[in-house]
Amino acid sequence: MTLKGWTLPQSPTGRSSLLPPPPWHYSGEIISADFTADPDQVAELLPPGMIPMGDGSGSFVFADWCSAADRDPRIRDDPAMGQYREAYCVLYGLFDDRKASRIPYIWVDSELSLVRGHVQGFPKKLGDIFMTRPVELGRGGVRKAVGSRFAAHVSALGRRLVTLGVTLEATVEKFYPPSVARPPLHTRLFPSVEGDEPSVYEFQRARIANFEIGTVFTGPATLEFGPSEYNEIDALGPVSVHKGYVHSMAFSVTGGSVQPVVPCP
Amino acid sequence: MTLKGWTLPQSPTGRSSLLPPPPWHYSGEIISADFTADPDQVAELLPPGMIPMGDGSGSFVFADWCSAADRDPRIRDDPAMGQYREAYCVLYGLFDDRKASRIPYIWVDSELSLVRGHVQGFPKKLGDIFMTRPVELGRGGVRKAVGSRFAAHVSALGRRLVTLGVTLEATVEKFYPPSVARPPLHTRLFPSVEGDEPSVYEFQRARIANFEIGTVFTGPATLEFGPSEYNEIDALGPVSVHKGYVHSMAFSVTGGSVQPVVPCP
Amino acid sequence: MTLKGWTLPQSPTGRSSLLPPPPWHYSGEIISADFTADPDQVAELLPPGMIPMGDGSGSFVFADWCSAADRDPRIRDDPAMGQYREAYCVLYGLFDDRKASRIPYIWVDSELSLVRGHVQGFPKKLGDIFMTRPVELGRGGVRKAVGSRFAAHVSALGRRLVTLGVTLEATVEKFYPPSVARPPLHTRLFPSVEGDEPSVYEFQRARIANFEIGTVFTGPATLEFGPSEYNEIDALGPVSVHKGYVHSMAFSVTGGSVQPVVPCP
Amino acid sequence: MTLKGWTLPQSPTGRSSLLPPPPWHYSGEIISADFTADPDQVAELLPPGMIPMGDGSGSFVFADWCSAADRDPRIRDDPAMGQYREAYCVLYGLFDDRKASRIPYIWVDSELSLVRGHVQGFPKKLGDIFMTRPVELGRGGVRKAVGSRFAAHVSALGRRLVTLGVTLEATVEKFYPPSVARPPLHTRLFPSVEGDEPSVYEFQRARIANFEIGTVFTGPATLEFGPSEYNEIDALGPVSVHKGYVHSMAFSVTGGSVQPVVPCP
């Protein structure tokens, strides 16, 4: 008898597993903004080997996702499984002489996404995330159109961590906001229970396919970071806030590649 | 000093109140289906004076709402306030010689909606509600288009109460599904703490304005009701399931009118 | 056919109702502290006819309840129903020439308690409430004993509203902390949908029976109120914080008596 | 600059980490029952190398925990961190010629516990867990005493998975219920994103210290398992239900030891 399942819990059928392996597909609605932080604070959050841009540049992104997986149709078919929201910070630098990004902090509102994130090296925590959802008819909400104001916020453990607003002023086609344009470098970390050295501690970069982006609405943004006993996003300020973006986005993750983090902590 | 607030809590500013008075505006995405139940079970759920159609007809509706209120801009502007989902049963009959509908059971996932519902006579309880949200790009979800399958379900206190699916086969314009076409008759009930007679026990019908409906996608539906210690939707079967619908909808509630329930229970 | 149920939803059996009528029984664990606020801020929160003490005195109370109802055994027997936590502010004054208390703000983490509170005139909102639970064995927590520190906090809509700590220094028997000693005056408020005058707007005082209090642990306390878009507890400061209390408490509510609020707002 | 943290997210201070390393301390209140399942179903859930007892014996355990960690005082001091509930199935067999237990399925209601569990090889999922909490005074609940009935249940994704009841009939001292008496064998599984072989796939056994158990209340039990799209506990029946137990328990985890799972799946 073999126990099956890409993750725990394993069972005879495999259908209890929290998650199937890639390919995973993502379709989402994004509300984001660019900011400048103290460059020293940014540098401190980058992993060994990643060189900061030096300008303190960063972005904060809210995403309302639908996701699917080739090997488990339940994820797309059951709205309780594939749908979730996430909120994450993106910092910028160079790695292996190429432009790269780093996600030091990220919150999600789903168990599936939390666990899938940890496997990839996203440092996901649970949070309560709310985002303006545009409407098609009537006066109950705002349209995805120039003139509207979109808002988003995330809280965790009863502390408001990030509050973001964007006023839609213009549209641009075939444009990639900074948070989208540079591939993220993640750190997969699985602790050991026997000693100090982690069992897994390695950089991970995803293999992305089928990337699509819709019309990008841009405009002035507001962005605030708040304090918490358990989260440190407020160390990034922000010092100044730049453009905000609202757009659709989709891609697939077909797998990833890893390399050692040197030196190990 | 006067305490202000349309509902509790009242405060010097009024800004702690759970809710402002109407007008309230609603913009939503609907997934629904028509069913037939045992006509006796339907008759038992209608209030005094409402005459059942006798055919056991009913509908079950899931709605993903954005809402707004003229007197409190926070509701539209903060996505944590105005957005919520609800799931409700609609039964049909005659009242005052006119076609009417009745909502015997309804679940929502927001405090604001729960309290606003009780004021109007919606018998709202809290529940966990999930609905297919269509996507614009990519393979993470389904399109709002012929060929897609939409799903929705509601659970309360750890029991799955209703599971609904619709396969989109055709579109129709300027069409009102039954659950939309007949005005609901609600019962406002506020108990007394002094005796058996309720303090408020009256029929309520909303004044609706600005009604709009988008393209209606229709197709075959599946619908299941489940048992629970605290909910009785499963008494309605359903005996058979008919068409399903996916559409946008919007309207405003500008107030309501009441009349006594005779006899009082 | 009669629809049954002390509250909505009414059904043929009555077992869908959110709540049965009193008697209701309560057994709880309390963590509380006394504070002083700006007397003007306290005065502004008292209802018409209630005379402030003038000293700005108040208390903040966290309670971890088990509750039961004579007419619905499900509430005691199902831990998902009768158990909940609440967090509330108590202010002091005179009403009808007698000492009285007022609860301007209160948060709970259960639907049943929210609705039961509104019927009685408690201005309940939903919140996330955490309280130190003492342990019997081991090092995973603290004992209910001199030397321990207890903590409690409440958040709503992602904002930390109140954080309280008490260091247990002494015990006292047959002692009633201020928050317990004075009977609260509530305002039952049920809005009208037809006009500006509420349908119900009256003072309510509960009939209490079977009151019991256990050993009271006392000691120095810390108390902080935080800001929020939707809550105004931070207007009370506090200016200074006094003693804290940890104790068990139990009582029954057998009904209530009401009188008009004059003038109506 | 070094990033610190035993788990993700790592930060300059280390205080964003989801979890510190052991030692971890646990103090809990237990409600559990023994059952018999189809021996074939039990055998299918044991890992390679673990020999089933052949009698289909198992237990289901609910625990209300307070936890602490030597290297992070926030976990004990903040009731939002260290307190959580969990619900788990225990099966029995032989491993390395000694009696062992296996936890094929477990649900928890806290992020910290979910992640701490995965590091140790507990196959934790999130769930909604409710347990009778005994009271000290009054009629709002039941006493931890002979004659009381305790109840517990767990739901996940809107499906009731397990419902347990115990009527307290007798007490016994210095007694270890089966679920406590045999050390569990866990499987640490951390998937690879590069290929089919997991990055970590190994047996783990915890080093336990400071074990304490209080008076054990025993009596007849009821136990039901329910179906779900995502969980398979109902495959275990149960065929018959035996004694139930209510007791306090405490222990520390000071680390663990691992060995390969052979063969790898």
Image (spheres, coloured by chain):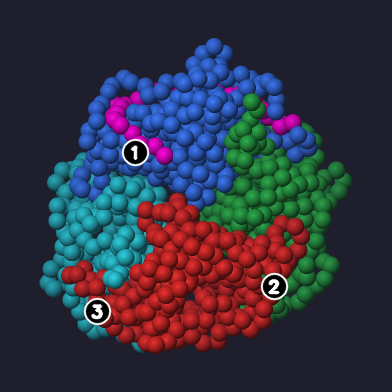
Chain colours: A red, B green, C blue, D cyan
Q: Is residue C204 magenta?
A: yes
* Left or right: B181 in relation to D222: right
Distance between the Cα atoms at labels 3 and 1? 42 Å
Instruction: Name the subunit of mark 1.
Output: C
Looking at the image, which residue is at 54% across and 65% down? Answer: A241
Q: Nearer the viewer, mark 1 or mark 2?
A: 2
Looking at the image, which residue is at 20% across and 44% down? Answer: C137
Distance between the Cα atoms at labels 3 and 2? 46 Å
Q: Amino acid at mark 3?
A: Pro
| Vertical placement of residue A206 versus B76, above or below | below
Q: Which quarter of the rendered picture does the N terminus of chain A lie within?
A: bottom left
Q: Position of residue C149 (x, y in %)?
A: 28, 39
Residue at disc 3, secondary structure: loop
Counting other residues with Cα less than 10 Å from the Cα at mark 2, is it few (<14), some (14-19), or many (20 or more)?
A: few
Q: Nearer the viewer, mark 3 or mark 1?
A: 3
Query: Which residues make up the magenta segment?
Result: C197-224
Checking the image for residue C165, the label placed there is 1
Q: Residue furthest top?
A: C97
Disc 3 vs disc 1: Cβ atoms closer than 8 Å?
no
Q: Which quarter of the rendered picture does the C terminus of chain A lie within?
A: bottom left
Quadrant of res B191: top right
Q: Amino acid at mark 2?
A: Ala
Q: Is residue B39 visible?
A: no
Q: Which residue is mark 2?
A: A170
Whichever of labels 3 and 2 marks the residue nearer the N terminus, that label is 2
Q: Amino acid at mark 1?
A: Gly
Q: Is residue B126 magenta?
A: no
Residue at disc 2, secondary structure: strand
Q: Which residue is mark 3?
A: A263
The main secondary structure of the magenta stretch is strand
* Left or right: A8 in relation to D253: right
